[in-house]
Image (spheres, rainbow, N blue to C red):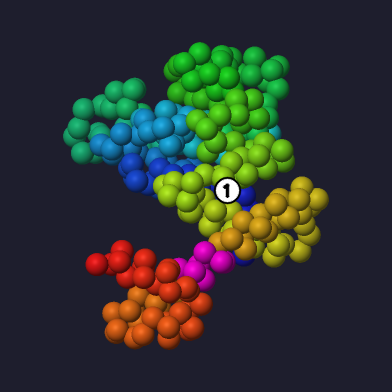
Amino acid sequence: MTKFPYDEFAKEFLEILLSPFGKVEPSYKIAAEVREVDVYFTPSGNNLNRTDLGLLGKCANTPVVLEPFRNSVMVPQIRACMSKLYDLHANIYRAAKRDKQPEPKDEILPTLWILTPTLSDPLLTNLGARLDVELGEGVYLLPPAQKTGIVVIHRLPRTPETLWFRLLGKEGVQKRAIEEVAQLPPGHPYRQNTLELLGNLKVTLEARTIIPPEDRELIMQLSPLYLEQIQAAKQEGKREIALKMLRENIPLETISRITELSIEQLQQLGSNQE
């Protein structure tokens, strides 16, 4: 069982959201001293500026390193993240030189995005961070040469565009975001995968020997969603069994008795396969 459930959840969550649009490399290892960035994402030709990814899509429309933190990030952690970013840049330069390619331009090098639930104004000032007027409240940029931005999740406005970042927040912010995910229409491209990952997070948290009060509250909130996923899986399994039996021309009454699906549901299921 993983020792850092929130880290694994954040990595898998960001991978699910970004993988349709490019190459996602969780736990990406950097040469020399073995170090990992949480998520290294390189977009492909697909357009990431989609409304269903919102602010995440805007932040990741160029190569990025994403470093999510469960608790408020501290200066040593910020410096460690930036150090890994610059090691990654150095690797890219070395690879270009080795392959006898032109030196990469600064704009194509990955940008670091640090995701933190909270961060104080004095610390932002000390970092030289300024509000990104284009991306809005809660998004801050360090001086351009540092290629680093910080998303302060609890400062983000509560809008659909910020949902996927707010889901990585804490306490009330995360709770409301989970409720918003559950209320998304069933056909939404990220609803099902996100609910499954939240269900996995619940199981992981419950398996810990000592469960902090904050995690107990989260487990309680996730329990109904977890049951929903179990029911959905059972229904899907029933539909698969019913489809197989329909193909074998077994009477509808028999299939209904075995799968507990109504005759109307079976007729609809059969018509969808024609």
Q: In this view, does 72 lie above or below 260?
A: above
Q: In this view, does 64 lie to the left or right of 8?
A: left
Which residue is found at the position 56% from the left and 45% from the top?
A: 183
Which residue is found at the position 69% from the left and 65% from the top?
A: 207
Q: Is residue 18 left or right of residue 104?
A: right
Which residue is found at the position 67% from the left and 42% from the top?
A: 175
The reply to whether the magenta stretch includes residue 77 is no
Where residue 60 sits: x, y (%)? 41, 32
**Span of residues in magenta:** 230-236
Mark 1, residue position: 182
Amino acid carrying mark 1 in the image = Ala
Compare residues 193 and 204 and report the one nearer the observer.
193
Which residue is found at the position 29% from the left and 23% from the top?
A: 105
Residue found farthest to the right: 213
Instruction: Please identify the quadrant where the C terminus is shown.
Output: bottom left
Where residue 151 sits: x, y (%)? 56, 28
Compare residues 38 and 180 and report the one nearer the observer.
180
The reply to whether the magenta stretch includes residue 233 is yes
Q: Is the magenta stretch mostly helix, strand or loop?
A: helix
Compare residues 189 and 239 and report the one nearer the observer.
239
- Residue 42's image quarter? top left
